[in-house]
Image: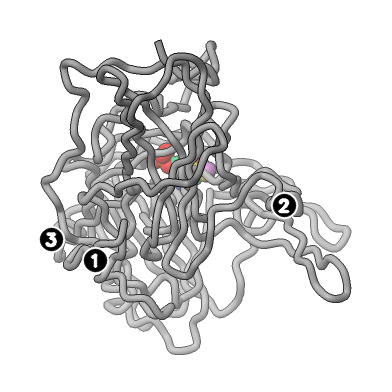
Amino acid sequence: MGRGVSRRNVLMGGTALVGLGTSAVPNLGFPLLESDEVLVPFTDFPSDFNPNPRSGVRYLDTRKIKNFITPSDQFFTVQHYGRPSIDPTKYRLRISGLVEKPLELSLHNLRQRQRSVHIVGFECSGNSPRRINPLVGNARWSGVSLRGLLQESGIKAHATEVIFWGADKGTEEVSHGGTKAKVDQPFGRSLAVADAMRSEVLVVYEMNGEPLSPEQGAPVRLIVPGWYGVANVKWLTHIHVQDRRFMGKFMAREYVTLRGLQSSEGIVWNETSVSRIQLKSMVARVTRRGRRCKILGFVLNDGTPLSSVEVRINEGPWRPATIDRSSTAYSWKLFTYYWENAPRGEHRILSRVIDAYGRVQPEEKDLELKKTRWENNAQFTRTVMIA
Ligand SMILES: Nc1nc2c(c(=O)[nH]1)N[C@H]1C(S)=C(S)[C@@H](COP(=O)(O)O)O[C@H]1N2
Ligand SMILES: [Mo]
């Protein structure tokens, strides 16, 4: 895994949680709403919030997060070209390009292989505080390791890039160098070989112990732990290996972030393809028992161990929150903070997360040089009304 920090010793809230490999499947559910607790209403929640805002899209109502694992029928869903339906008995996954042995695998072939299970949480990189970040979820994904498949196909030494195409297509007008072509293109994303060969990247056929649903990519999808949703290609039918960068629409023309870097020469404008999840936390649910409030939130990041999550009330001091022990490297991490003697009235609640490299979740003003909408991980003030 490299990057200098061992993911086995996930440092959280000051305690080293040993043995939390991503394949650990903890049984520690997050505490449910207890009978004598009341929900504290948010005053910033959009009054027209609709969990199914339009056909093909499902939002997670983050106030209702009760479980570490998001139930499949609540997990968010989006896609760009509509949902193809694939007959699982006719399904084939093709692996082509710079490999010694091109493969064509049926669902049965995949299921016969060694099964890997990872808990992975992710959000769409277009997730927005305006709708209270509803494009998010955390699930248990089962399938086979992509690395195993690439090794079996005999990936060649000079390969640098692995493309993943879905069965869903759109007609795109592509324009380069003053020439234009109109073509039917499948949804496609790629990974550098080094990223594709991480042992935790999965070719998935089950979500939360059930076959993938049509909206979540049935029968087979990719899951790239620690990356934004766009990397997790649904309805995956074709993997292609090559020796040059893939510049498809969703790598190079959409899901691109424009960000200014301060340098001694002034600002350098950088454009990058959306990839690893930026360090983010959000307060999601507040409950109260008498004057004691329980603040629950979640953290998403690229899998780097965390150093702390903190909560701040009404511009008071930052205070440490407790990270739930069910957290794994690539899950979302639920956290709680108890606020004693919470007075009646409206209050502002903010959270921030700091990782083991000392990276701090940015404030909104720190993102002024990010000029495009993707990857908004700014600290997010919530407002509540306490009765
Ligand atoms: N084949 C295909 N895969 C896709 C997409 C798509 O349009 N087509 N959308 C991506 C985007 S932008 C996101 S955020 C996630 C959403 O995954 P979910 O619907 O399972 O939550 O799927 C990704 N995979
Ligand atoms: Mo997305």
Where on the picture, by quarter, is residue 261? bottom right
Callout 2 amino acid: Lys
Q: Reading the chain from its start, which is encountered first: label 3 or label 2? A: 3
Is 186 situated left or right of 325 in this image? right
Q: Where residue 196 appears, x then y in whole percent?
A: 41, 70
Q: Reading the chain from its start, which is encountered first: label 1 or label 3? A: 1
In the image, residue 109 sits, relative to residue 157, either above or below, namely above
Where on the picture, by quarter, is residue 89? top left
Callout 3 amino acid: Gln
How packed mark 1 is, by other alpha carbons closer than 10 Å (few <14, some 14-19, many 20 or more), is few
Callout 1 amino acid: Ala
In the image, what residue occupies the spot 39% across and 52% down?
Answer: 236
Q: Secondary structure at mark 2?
A: loop
Where on the picture, by quarter, is residue 202? bottom left
Pointer 1 residue: 16
Q: Secondary structure at mark 3?
A: helix
Q: Nearer the viewer, residue 118 or 192?
A: 118
Pointer 3 residue: 112
Mark 3 CB within 8 Å of ligand 1:
no
Pointer 2 residue: 370
In the image, what residue occupies the spot 44% across and 89% down?
Answer: 157
- Which of discs 1 and 2 lies nearer the camera? The answer is 1
- Rounded to the nearest angstrom, the CA distance separating label 3 from label 2 is 45 Å
Q: Where residue 90 appears, x then y in whole percent?
A: 27, 46
Q: Quadrant of the C terminus?
A: top left
